[in-house]
Image: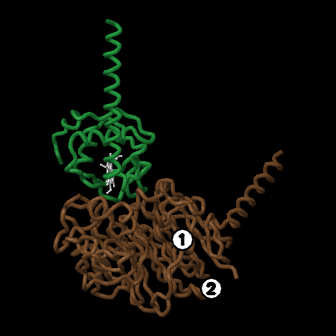
Chain colours: A brown, B green
Amino acid sequence: MKNLKTIIFFAVVILALNLNAQNNAGLKLPEGFKATLFADTIGSARHIAITKSGVVFAKLMYPNKAGKSIIRLEDVNKDGIADKINGWANYGGTGIIIKGKDLYATSDNDVYLYQLNDKDEVVNPLSPKTIVKGLIAKNQHASKSITLDGDNNVYVNIGAYSNACQEKDRTPGSKGMMPCPILDSAGGIWKFSGTKENQVYGDGKRYATGLRNVVGLDWNTQSNSLFVMQHGRDQLNSFYPTLYNDAQNAELPAETMYELHEGDNAGWPYVYFDPYQKKKILAPEYGGDGKKEGGENALNPTVFFPAHMAPNGLLFYTGDQFPAKYKNGAFIAFHGSWNRAPLPQEGYFVAFVPFKDGKPNGEWEIFANGFSGLAEGEKVTNVRKVKSRPCGLAQGPDGSLYVSDDARGSIFKISYAK
Amino acid sequence: MAKQLTILFSTLLFFTISANAQDVVKGKKIYETRCLACHQADGGGVPNMNAPLDGSSNLVGNNIARLVKIIRGGYSEKIALDGYYYNNVMTANPDLKDEDIANVLSYVRNSWSNKASKVTVAQVQAVKNKK
């Protein structure tokens, strides 16, 4: 009897493992790709980073049930599923990035630096170096995401604590402030030294401005420049119902990718990018009517995507595992929209844009879909019921792509088998 | 006499019911134009972003004054609501009349799985602090 139970137990386990492998952890992928559920229910996994030996680290938006907010995941038996999981730190946050044995992680105010040993275990979980401190974090776009260039500088997104820089945020009829005072300390990317301790605003510089909120950002080693994904503004129809109906709000403005150089300005809050007119349109808070153009000195997007899909992760793929078309291209994790209601929501997938020599080289396409858990072709209408929301991206040493999800707390590992 | 009373009573009852139904219809309209964008059609909100109204213990609770202030003045506090935090700022509705506030609150307190008493105009008027 006991034997029978054991046999049944193992049969179920094997079946479950098989199903996991067969159905690609529920994801829909291009021909030849497969996925495993590398980890599940680890907590609200935002960004992820991977060491050269393949150890995965995830930053959680809130400490998990065990009170930990940086999770270390190792796949000791190399079956595509993490089997050694532990964690440290007790502060929520989004940003995490690894360079060699340096692990940078962020709270909503600070950037910390931890040291890893030769087994990629954290040496100083309780006493990280504080690299940057005292960044603005209010109750909106507070999360700090980070990336590094090749010169030991760290780039930090400081999101605008506002939707459209109105005198009263998200209030119908409230005018846009001119100039927008938020831009002095937020609404842009700040550059700091990655090695100096205890830096504050004055020690860094505003690298680029006019960015409402960036969550996904990555350094492109081909162009040797920073690329970011902006979250476009919300609620055009709520505040300007005579200019924008529900259907127009659902498609305006585009979500945008920018290549940034020092001193660049992407135009928020004065303009937004209209994907149909393919123009920078003056925001209604600043006298716009949906047609008037603006932002003469502001950047045009490098690539644009449908509205409100919330790009939370950006990764330039430098691996050799995937087919040649993916080399040096951009993967983007779209967390999924909410501001398309009452129309159905969009996003909840990982997209791909081919790049050549640091420039886009073809149309964007959906790479991995099915995170929402809905049947194919079914649109999200109840955001609360969505199973997984793609958030962070990282590349493993073997060229596999990892995708984190802050709804269910899972990490997917996507690989290509020739 | 008894018959007359019955007629009077049913007439009254009829008016009360239809008046109530009216409130809910009006409340629903306000919800759709002013609240649905964030709190969604299913009242489920958006995890970590916009608080759910369906199943909110505060919403079906007795602190009507707090609810009225939230609708009038908007809301953005880093306070856990049923154990979770929300990273968005709720729009203020300074232009909504007391009656509209009563209607929309009555609607959300009695939609989806929520069941609670209706909010009266008098209860809204009683909240003097217009902030």
The answer to whether residue A221 is above or below residue B10 is: below
- Secondary structure under tag 2 reads loop
Residue A306 place in picture, x, y as percent: 43, 71
Distance CA(mark 2)–CA(mark 1): 19 Å
Residue B4 place in picture, x, y as percent: 32, 10
Q: Quadrant of residue A53?
A: bottom right
Q: Could you tell whether A340 is left or right of A201 in the image?
A: right
Q: Could you tell whether B38 is left or right of A374 in the image?
A: left
| Residue B45 seen from this side | yes
Please tell me which residue is depicted at 33% across the width and 88% down the height of the picture: A261
Output the chain of dot 2.
A
Q: Could you tell whether B22 is left or right of A312 in the image?
A: left
Q: Which labelled disc corresponds to residue A367? A: none
- Secondary structure under tag 1 reads strand
Pointer 2 residue: A323
Q: Are marks 2 and 1 in contact (CB under 8 Å)?
A: no
Kindly report which numbered mark, 2 or 1, lies closer to the viewer in this rendering.
2
Q: Mark 1 Cα within 10 Å, few/some/many (few <14, many 20+)?
A: many
Please tell me which residue is depicted at 17% across the width and 74% down the height of the picture: A179
Residue A40 place in picture, x, y as percent: 58, 61
The answer to whether residue B17 is above or below residue B102 is: above
Pointer 1 residue: A403
| Residue A128 seen from this side | no
The amino acid on which the numbered mark 1 sits, given as a three-letter code, is: Val
> Could you tell which of marks 2 and 1 lies nearer the N-terminus?
2
Output the chain of dot 1.
A
Residue at the extreme top: B1
The amino acid on which the numbered mark 2 sits, given as a three-letter code, is: Pro
Residue B104 place in picture, x, y as percent: 31, 43
